[in-house]
Every structure is written in C-alpha cells, then in structure tokens.
Image (cartoon, helix red, strand yellow):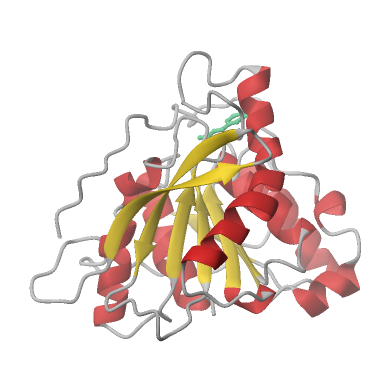
C-alpha cells in the first residue's frame, strides 16, 4: 500500500544531556526484533492509513489525527484501540516515520498481535497545534498537558462513535514517544478507568514523578495490566524511565524497562517499542 502521509519534523537531538541524573535500576532483557519487522513485505494483507478530523470542544477547533485500520477491518467486528502519541517536534503525522502500518501488517502476517485500531493524534492541544516556531515554548509545551482533556472528552468519544470499537478500559491502550511517552505515563496511569495498558518510549521530562503517577500502589497493581517502557542507553532522557522503574521495583508494581543497546533518541528505539508493545496488549 502506498502511504501518502509524511512527517515534516523529527525530534530534536536529545542525546547529550551532561547533567542528566543517573538513576540505577534493573533493566529487562533486550531481545532484538527480527530483521524484517519494519520492512515492507510482499504478498501480505495490508491495513489502511487515513487522516481523520474531529471537533475539539477542549480547544475550540477541528483537529486532525492519523488512523490505522487493520487488514480486513469490518464493521461486523469490534476492535480495541491503541492511542499512539508523538514527540515535541511532531504532529499527527510524525509516527508515520516509524512505519506503524508496516510493523503492524508484519505482526498480523505472523499472527503476533491482536487486531486493533491505532489512532495517532496531534498531542499539542492548542489552537495553533503545528510544530512550528519555538517548539519548547511554554504555550507549546502546555498543549501537551491540555491534550489530556482533548483525548478523554473529545477524541476518544469521536473514535468510538465513528469506528467499530470496544469501549471499556481493557480495550484501550496508550503509548507514545518522548513527550508522547510522558503523556502516556501521565494520562494512562492517571486514568486507569480509561486505559489498562500503558507504554512509554524514551519518555521526556514531562513525565510526572513516580509518587504522582502511582499514588496508590495497590490500586495500580490491581488495575493496570501492562506498564511497559523502552529507552536507548545513549539517550539523555533515560532518567525519566529509570526513576519510574526503580519505584515500581521497590513497590512490587509489575513494570518493564528495556535499555535499548546503543539506542539514541530516535525511531530505531520507537519502532522497536511499537513492535513489542503491540504484541503485549489486548
Ligand atoms: C526536555 C527535553 C526533551 C523536554 C522535552 C523533551 C519538556 C522532549 C523531547 C521529545 O519529545 O523528543 O527538557 O522538556
């Protein structure tokens, strides 16, 4: 299938952060993905990528998202939904740099994932939500926080009214890269009534402190079904992930953090994140 969407922006170079705190933690075992996991294979069924628009009462604008429907999507079936969030330099097209359609099509060809819809929104919920000007400015960053409300009260209801989806927490997952990883941890652990599965890939400094993410250890242990993270060992943002992993290990909360060998702050790590996370949800 020809993919006409493309992303305009890449995440900034975050590799070097000399004063980043180093937090010791136990990493989970890295297993390489098969060489073909992100390569377009011949003669397999393909899902479809579309751009959608929804009305945001939170922002007061019409907002865009990219959606992946799995091969043979049918209104006769119901699907779980993964909300997949981009980074500080991206928008609803950024994840296309990570060929999520190819990764998912390959997983389905090998029977390695449940059928799911993937929604890739614009996570900067402000009137000008483009990744332009100073992407690190306070108002642009604030948009990533405001998106919590846009996601929960505008986007999710829209998706569940227009597509054939399940509508319970056990059929919703949220994951993202960098700023989107921080958002996923914040929103996913903060709203376990909405999301049972949470993934953070190279999560950024918008990630809340562990005590805020998991104020009630027993409740998180009971309600969260997957807390899964990956971060490159060359990425200066590792402390956001290792801080949470450390807290989880100390408190007996099941949590995975894979240290991607030689991994930087880029799509090598994020594609690996999607490939693995998608096999573990639903
Ligand atoms: C920061 C460094 C990196 C930060 C955000 C990022 C909010 C995000 C990076 C990305 O999304 O790629 O200090 O502060």
Quadrant of ligand 1 in image: top right
Which quadrant does the N terminus fall into? bottom left
x%, y% of residue 276?
A: 44, 69
Give the left or right position of residue 126, taking residue 109 as reference: right
Give the left or right position of residue 196, taking residue 3 as reference: right
Number of marks: 0
x%, y% of residue 51?
A: 35, 49
Which quadrant does the C terminus fall into? bottom right
Is residue 112 shown above or below 86?
A: below
Q: Pick out the residue farthest to the left.
A: 42
Q: Residue at x 63, y 33 (%)?
A: 60
Quarter of the rendering containing residue 219: bottom right
Q: Residue at x 58, y 66 (%)?
A: 173
The foreground one among 163 and 262 is 163
Q: Residue at x 53, y 21 (%)?
A: 135
Query: Taking the image as drawn, is residue 257 in sight?
Result: no
Give the left or right position of residue 49, taking residue 18 as reference: left
Query: Taking the image as drawn, is residue 13 in sight?
Result: yes
Q: Residue at x 57, y 78 (%)?
A: 166
x%, y% of residue 268?
A: 35, 49
Q: Pick out the residue farthest to the top.
A: 133
Is residue 176 shown above or below 123?
A: below
């Amino acid at each position: 299938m020809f993919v006409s969407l493309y992303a305009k922006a890449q995440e900034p170079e975050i590799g070097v952060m000399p004063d980043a705190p180093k937090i010791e933690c136990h990493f989970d075992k890295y297993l390489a993905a098969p060489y073909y996991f992100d390569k377009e294979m011949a003669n397999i069924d393909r899902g479809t990528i579309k751009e959608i628009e929804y009305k945001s009462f939170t922002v007061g604008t019409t907002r865009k998202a990219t959606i992946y429907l799995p091969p043979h999507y049918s209104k006769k079936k119901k699907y779980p939904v993964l909300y997949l969030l981009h980074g500080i330099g991206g928008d609803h097209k950024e994840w296309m740099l990570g060929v999520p359609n190819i990764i998912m099509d390959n997983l389905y060809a090998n029977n390695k994932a449940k059928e799911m819809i993937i929604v890739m929104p614009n996570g900067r919920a402000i009137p000008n939500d483009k990744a332009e000007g100073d992407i690190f400015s306070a108002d642009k960053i604030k948009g990533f926080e405001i998106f919590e409300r846009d996601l929960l009260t505008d986007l999710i209801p829209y998706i569940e009214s227009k597509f054939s989806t399940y509508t319970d927490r056990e059929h919703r997952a949220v994951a993202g890269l960098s700023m989107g990883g921080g958002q996923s941890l914040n929103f996913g652990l903060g709203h376990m009534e909405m999301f049972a599965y949470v993934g953070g890939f190279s999560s950024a400094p918008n990630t809340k402190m562990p005590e805020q993410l998991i104020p009630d250890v027993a409740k998180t242990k009971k309600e969260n079904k997957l807390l899964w993270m990956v971060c490159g060992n060359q990425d200066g943002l590792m402390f956001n992930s290792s801080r949470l992993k450390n807290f989880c290990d100390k408190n007996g909360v099941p949590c995975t953090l894979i240290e991607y060998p030689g991994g930087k702050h880029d799509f090598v790590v994020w594609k690996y994140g999607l490939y693995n996370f998608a096999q573990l949800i639903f």
